[in-house]
Amino acid sequence: MSEPHRKKSPGGAAPARRKDASGSPLRLASSAGRWAVAATVLGSGAVFLEGTVTTVALPTIGRDFGLGMSGLQWLVNAFLLPLSALILLGGSLGDRYGRRRLFIIGLLGFAAASFLCILAPSFAALLACRVCQGIFGALLIPNSLAILDALFTAEDRGAAIGQWAGWSGISTAIGPLVGGWLADTFSWRWVFACVVPFALAAAWIAARRMPADEPSGTGTVDYLGAALVTLGLACVTGALVAGKDLGGLPAEVALGGAGVLLLAGFAVVEHRTAQPLLPPDLFRSWQFSGTN
């Protein structure tokens, strides 16, 4: 993304450049730089791994809890829906209250939710834990990338983000292989256990080795926009996944229509609020619009 589009994050605040103990931006070759990359790679990698490692364990989970296709779809969506819908809010909260702080909170919450998935006695409990995984993942993912953008010198920033992206892609790709092996060798509960050490290690590194940033502490957080986009996506997803079970075509139309109206309301709010969750000006960039 070009520099003009980098000056403001989705929350609307300009990112403050972080510095090491000497007051200078970090270099990738430095010890502090390597620790920072390790923390962000481990943390975001745990979320990306969890996004795919569960997939191959779904049949086993379905047999244990007596789930049909709709139940298995919700088990996936319970994680992906809050992760995708709240990721903009997570970035905005990081701008206001500190990216490292939100990153660590997200890691600890994600580790706790993953551990509770291991102990889930019922499908409802597992579903609730999956929702919590998605919520805390939405706090750590955008802030892991924002940390790298704000922490490194201009010369090393691209390489640091490239390492983050590369390792994140690897963790996503190996998820099905690891999940299948764990489910076949031990139990489906181990597919949730495998990410806990990575999240805890990333939290420790971030707390002990990563420079703290100074939160802006100013402006407002677009909670209304976050509520509208989250509810809108939930309604549309519900219409596609569970509309048939909830009453067929009338339920699908009602849920889908409500979702479209809520998402339209989100677009209106983003154009009118002073500090939007998703600044409409970003879509003036053909690169941004095309990629999304």
Image (spheres, rainbow, N blue to C red):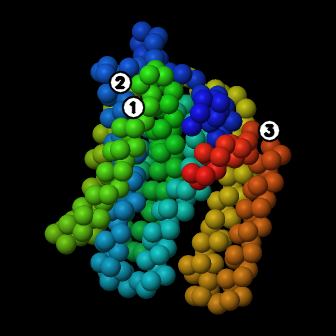
What residue do we see at 47% from left, 45% from top? 141
**Pair 3/1: label in front:** 1
Are circles 3 and 2 on residues that touch, CB within 8 Å? no
Whole-number angstrom distance, CA of label 3 to CA of label 2: 36 Å
Farthest residue, direction right: 272
Query: Which residue in the structure is indicated by mark 2?
Result: 28
Image x and y of residue 256, in percent: 69, 75
**Pair 2/1: label in front:** 1
Q: Callout 3 environment at 10 Å: few (<14), some (14 to 19), or many (20+)?
A: some
**SS type, badge 3:** loop
Number of numbered discs = 3
Quick one: label 3 or label 1, which is nearer the N terminus?
A: 1
Quick one: label 2 or label 1, which is nearer the N terminus?
A: 2
Residue 159 is marked as 1
What residue do we see at 52% from left, 43% from top? 142
Q: Nearer the viewer, residue 175 or 122?
A: 175
> Is residue 156 among what the camera can see?
yes
Query: Which residue in the structure is indicated by mark 3?
Result: 274
Question: What's under tag 2, amino acid-wise?
Answer: Leu
